[in-house]
Image: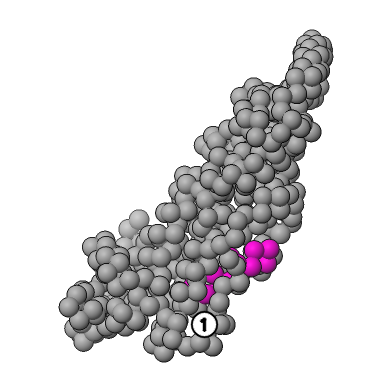
Amino acid sequence: MEAEDDTAGTIIDEDEICINGGNDAQSSQRHRPIISGEQLDVEAYAALYTGRTKITRLVFIAEKCGVQSMQLEALRMAYDEIKKGENTQLFRDVLSKIAGRLGPNYGPDNGWADAVDRRAELRREKLENELNAYRTNLIKESIRMGYNDFGDFYYLHGQLGEAFKNYVRTRDYCTTSKHIVHMCLNAILVSIEMGQFTHVTSYVSKAEQSQDALDPVTIAKLRCAAGLAHLEGKKYKLAARKFLETGPELGNSYTEVIAPQDIATYGSLCALATFDRAELKSKVIDNVNFRNFLELVPEIRELINDFHTSHYASCLEYLGNLKANLLLDIHLHDHVETLYEQIRSKAIIQYTLPFVSVDLNMMANAFNSSVTGLEKELAGLITNDQIQARIDSHNKILYARHADQRNGTFQRVLQTGSEFDQEVRAMLLRANLIKHDYNLKSSRKH
C-alpha cells in the first residue's frame, strides 16, 4: 500500500468519529448493516453462471464450504448440470465426491456415459475427416473453422489443453480482425478455466490491438479478463481499474466467466484496498457506469459509502458478514485475507490522519477491537512508516509526529527566495546579451 495514497482526503470532524464508535443510537441505526452472516444460497448463486464455470464453482463450494448440507446441494446441482453436457470425466469426478450420499438418483450412470463417449468418438472422427479435406483444398476460412470446431469439441468434453491448442491454431488462418478477436476470446476463456492467467494477459493485449473489430460488449469482456489476470497476480490496483472500466453493456453476456455481481465485488474490494479517498470518490462512488454493477450488490455499495464517510465500524461489519461467502469464490478466495488486511490498515490510517492525538479506547470502540489488539496493529503500521506517530501505552494515547510547520514555512520561503534570485540574474543576463546584440552577431558567424 502506497503511503501517499493515505495522506489525501478531507479532515473528519472529531464528533463524527466519536459517533462512529457507537455512542449515538440514531447513527448506529442509520448505518446498521442490511446483511447478515447467513449461509450462501447455492441455487441463487449458481443461477448467475452458465457453462463450465457454473459446474467448477459448484464443485469448489462443495470442497471449501465445510457444511454438509451445502456441500451436498452443490454436488447435486453440479451432477444435474453435467448431465446436460458431455463431459464424462467431470461427471466421474463429481460422482466420486458424492460417494452415494444423495441416493440412487445421483449414482453412476454408465449407460449415459458410454453413449456420450461413443457419440464423442464419432464426432471427433467426422471433424478430423472434414479438417483433412479442408487442408487438401487449402481454403483458409474452412481450415480456420475446422480448428475452431475442434476447439469447441474438446472444450465441451473437458480437454482444455487440446481445446487451447486448436483455438490458437486458427490464428494462422485468420483473415480479418474479427477472426483474431474471436480467437483471442476463445483462448482467454480456456486459459481462465485452466488458471493460466499469463496467457489471459497476452491474448487480451492481442485482441485490443484490433480496435476496428471491438464492440462495447467485447471491450467489456476484455476488461473483465484483464481484471481477473491482475487479481490473480495480486496487482490489486490494476485489477480495480480494469473492473471499474468495465461498461454496463456487458450485462449477462459473459456469464461463462464472470457475473455482473462479481465485477462489483472484485472491483470494490480491490479499490478499497489500494485507492486513496479522492480516487475512491471519483472512480468508484461517482462512476456512473460502475454504479450499475454496484446496484446489484447493495452490501458492497453500502460498505464503500461507509468507508468513504469514515463510518469504519459499519464498514468493517459489512466486510465481516461477507467474508464467509467471499471465501467460497473461486477467484477471490486466495485474496480475501490480504485485501481485508489492507482495507483495515487503510481505515486505521485515515482515522488517525486528522488528529494530533487519538484516544485508543475511543478508537478501539470505533473499530470493534480490543485496545491491545489495536496497539499491535498501530505498532505494525508505525514500523512500516505508514503512520508517523508514537504510542503512549500507559495512557493509551496515540501522538502524531507532525512536521514542524514553522520550520517548514521558513525553508519554503528561503527556497522561493533562492529561485527568485536565480530567475532575476538570468533575466539581467539575457537583457545584457540582447543590448549588446550578442545573439545577432553569433548567428551571423554561422
Residue displayed at 24% across by 80% down: 397
In the image: residue 8, left or right of residue 223:
left
Q: Quadrant of the N terminus?
A: bottom left
> What span is in magenta?
295-307
In the image: residue 187, left or right of residue 121:
left
- Residue assigned mark 1: 28
Residue 209 visible (yes or no)? no
Image quadrant assignment for residue 204: top right
Expressed as whole percent of the image width and height from the top left, the position of residue 168 reads: 65, 27
Q: Along the line of sight, which residue is nearer the eye, 35 or 276?
A: 35
Q: Amino acid at mark 1?
A: Ser
The prevailing secondary structure element of the residues shown in magenta is helix
Mark 1 falls on what kind of element? helix
In the image: residue 271, left or right of residue 357:
right
182 is within the stretch colored magenta: no
Residue 92 visible (yes or no)? yes
Residue displayed at 62% across by 50% down: 223
Expressed as whole percent of the image width and height from the top left, the position of residue 375 reads: 26, 69
Expressed as whole percent of the image width and height from the top left, the position of residue 157 reads: 71, 25
The total number of labels drawn is 1
304 is within the stretch colored magenta: yes
> Dot 1: few (<14), some (14–19), or many (≥20) neighbours within 10 Å?
some
Using the image, determine if residue 406 lies above or below residue 431. below
